[in-house]
Image (cartoon, grey):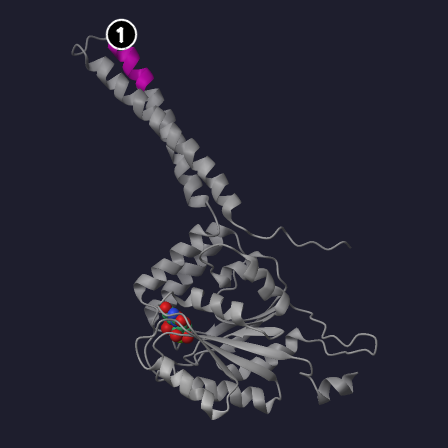
Amino acid sequence: MEGSYNSAPFKGVCLSVVIPVFNEEEVIGECVRRVSAILNREEIDHEILIVNDGSTDETLTRCLALRSLGHKIRVIDLGKNYGHMQALRSGLEASEGNFIATLDADLQDPPEYMPEMLRHLIISERSESNEDNQVEWDVVQAYRLDRSSDSFSKRKLATIYYWIISRLTGIKVIPHAADFRIMSRQVVDELKKLAEPKLVYRLLIPSLGFRIKEFPITRSRRFAGNTSYTTRKMIGLALESVVSFTYRPLRIMSLLGLVISFILFLAAVCVFIISIVSSTVPGWGSIVLLMLSVNSMLFAAIGLLGEYVGRIYEMSLSRPRPRWNEK
Ligand code: UDP
Ligand code: MG
């Protein structure tokens, strides 16, 4: 069996490589050339799925032109800029391979790692009775050993992001995980079932209990062009990462509401006692008492409301039930 592994390690494999692009006219040609070169060299059957996320430069024209150069390319055009995660989602939906890679276009994550990553997903001990590729891992997830190619502020923001997310959501997040991964078809089919409008794959995949092989990579500099992840997009992603995985912030607000309500109630009791035992300005006691008790009730209502909204939120997430194995 060892012999057949060495002679045809990727037999029966079709790899879909999903590449989201937004204004990558300077990069996309080189990216496709490098992806094709490595996959052809290793004799890996593949399709390169470029998802044009509403580019306003010549990206789309260049992608279409690349088809005439003999690359196995499919181009999906989203028509407007929906953002990186949505572009990935469309690519996953359109993919047809039995293994699916996601890769940024800018070549920061070198595509030359793909054959090695794919090998981890395939156990090629093809016995006579079982011709199928057996998958040992569900996902091979690249993470960056070294982020020196990113700016200082981006590195710091990334560290804070991963810290906050793992504390708030409790998900075992792989720090500095790139959106460079290879997944089995089963994983992608599960991801496609999710009906939520926005998906943050780097958190979603570990949270769904897939077996993830962490794969260290050294990140390069951007081949050309500039990052399209503006501060606004990064804040949006961070916010999405929190609100789509936990209602803990809402729960903190609910608890705060209940605590404030209790404090106001105690204050109301004190005011009531003061207005009885000492002589205050006429009307003061009743006005303050009214204010405090109404506010106390309002805060209590907000706290309870938060808890109910949290339950509805949890139900609205169409997450699959936990995966289990009988031992
Ligand atoms: N991207 C996208 N839509 C966007 C922003 C980015 O499809 O609105 C793509 C981009 O073309 C690239 C990938 O997402 O292929 C990662 O973007 P970028 O390299 O700018 O992010 P960074 O590496 O700086 O975090
Ligand atoms: Mg990049």
Q: Quadrant of residue 323?
A: bottom right
Residue 250 percent coordinates (x, y):
42, 42
Question: Which quarter of the figure is the N terminus placed in?
Answer: bottom right
The residue that appears at 33% across and 81% down in the rendered structure is: 225
Q: Residues within 10 Å of mark 1 (few under 14, many from 20)?
A: few
Reply above or below: 35 against 178.
Answer: below
- Magenta-drawn stretch, dominant element (helix, strand or loop): helix
Q: In this image, 299 relative to 241: left or right?
A: left
**Which residue extends farthest left?**
281
Q: Nearer the viewer, residue 260 or 82?
A: 82
**Residue type, numbered disc 1:** Ile
Residue 310 percent coordinates (x, y):
47, 40
Residue 211 percent coordinates (x, y):
63, 64
The residue that appears at 52% across and 52% down in the rendered structure is: 170
* Start-end of magenta stretch: 268-275
Q: In this image, 233 relative to 140: left or right?
A: left
Residue 17 percent coordinates (x, y):
53, 77
**Which residue extends farthest right?**
129
Reply above or below: 174 against 252.
Answer: below
Q: Is residue 173 magenta?
A: no
Whether residue 189 is visible here, answered yes or no, is yes
Q: Which residue is mark 1?
A: 276
Q: In this image, 15 relative to 164: left or right?
A: right
Whether residue 177 is visible here, answered yes or no, is no
